[in-house]
Image (tube, grey):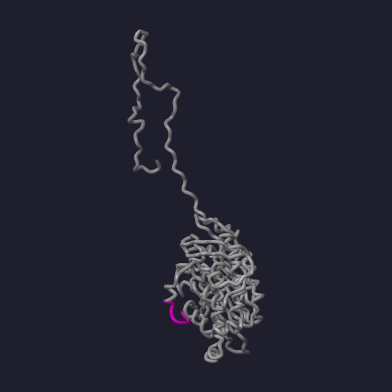
Amino acid sequence: MKLFGNRRHAAHAKKSTLPRGARTAILIAAIVLLLSGSAFAAWKLLVKPVERLAVSAPEPPAAGPETPEPSVVPVTPQEEEPEKTPEEDEDVPAEQPKALRDGVYNILICGTDGDGTRTDTIIIAHLDANDHTVALLSIPRDTPVATGNGGLMKINSVYAGGGADGMQRLAARLNSLLGFPVDGYVLVDLEAFKKTVDLVGGVDFDVPQDMNYEDASQNLYIHLQKGMQHLNGEQAMGLVRFRKGYASQDIQRTQVQQQFLKALAKQCLSVSSLTKLKEFADIFAEYVTTNLTTGNMVWFGKELLACDFDSMQAYTAEGEGAMINGASYYPLYAGRLLEIVNAAFNPYDAPIASGSLNVVTPEQAYSYQKQPDPEPEAPEEPEQTDEPQDTPEEPGDPEAPQEPADPDPIEDPFPDDTLWEEPDTDQKGT
């Protein structure tokens, strides 16, 4: 749902290629704007974390002492257990439901590309309100996911310009990929990043290398020198968009974006930025679409203020590049992804099993490679014989003796029109 206003202006805003990862900071900036004294007092009764339904908690006993019911999240809700039929396999064990831990949340944060049809930035933001720790997991845009017709598609295409519907589709895909559901989503428009950096007065950042790149078709001109410097919004946009000079391109760019995000988040939560709440509110209303309520946002903002962003952990799902049917993909390592999920993003009270992650690994990705069509068979050559070929006679010496003609020539049983008759095209198998 749209939290504030409408996106008419955003729809006509000037488009540019999306910086991956860094626009996550607009969520933090938007949360900060809700923390002013008068606004907080007005929304005090609404401030609460995201509600997560216990969709298949056990029915309370008919009699006996009461026992607390944990919050449980299975795959599908059901009112009551259906009657079993003789065809059901009684020996197949059902997966034990896992309870969600209190105060632990994962929010999907996305940013669209230049034309607004794909989510080139996909980040899972993890908040543990119990110890006030934050972690980010970036999903590479070329991560392959299986389609219903037996093919592959890139995960950044799942959204397909679908607004809330597209975000719900993407959230469902990420649930299948990572083994846990997200608790909400935030979709950010392009201009929010530059506006947020300028609003907080710029950000000090150590640029890892010289960055020089120009593309007039995108109105993109990047000229940054290596070293610590103060970046405004336009320069910061160039920093997070630059990729041509990196050995690993998108992956290394994601790491730079995560580092810049830490610096931007700290600047957004500084005392000086808290005096610009109205400006933050204007950016948030114009460029952000979310299914979180106002009370949810205030609650998350309050918890984020207590977090130490210097210790924030940032991860990128690991894999390797692969060319499949002429397209570039980045299939992931399933084992490494499971380690990251259980170490920093698991919302349950038990480890997530490997079978809960639906990952297209490099080995599986190559199985989708189509085999080239067989080359057409060459037509059969006529059989070669040792008999001399007839050649036209050359004029010779008229006085030379002539050989007598063959008095009884042998008739050819296969005249040329029969020997080279075209095959019947209506007959199969020729």
In the picture, residue 405 is in which quadrant?
top left
Q: Quadrant of residue 36?
A: bottom right
Q: Is residue 47 above or below residue 339?
A: below
Q: How many marks?
A: 0
- 109 and 223: which is toward the camera: 223
> Residue drawn 51% across and 82% down?
279
User: Mainly helix, strand or loop, the magenta region?
Assistant: loop
Can I make out residue 278 in this image? yes
Residue 4 inside the magenta-drawn segment: yes
Q: Bounds of the magenta span?
A: 2-8
Residue occupying the point 64% across, 72% down: 313
In x, y percent, where is residue 329?
A: 54, 60
Q: Return the x and y of residue 360 as percentages of the image width and height.
A: 56, 62
Taking depth in this image into account, of 303 and 208 the one nearest to the observer is 208
Looking at the image, residue 69 sits to the left or right of residue 420; the answer is right
Q: Is residue 168 visible?
A: no
Residue at the (45%, 73%) spot, across then down: 163
Relative to 272, residue 161 above or below: above
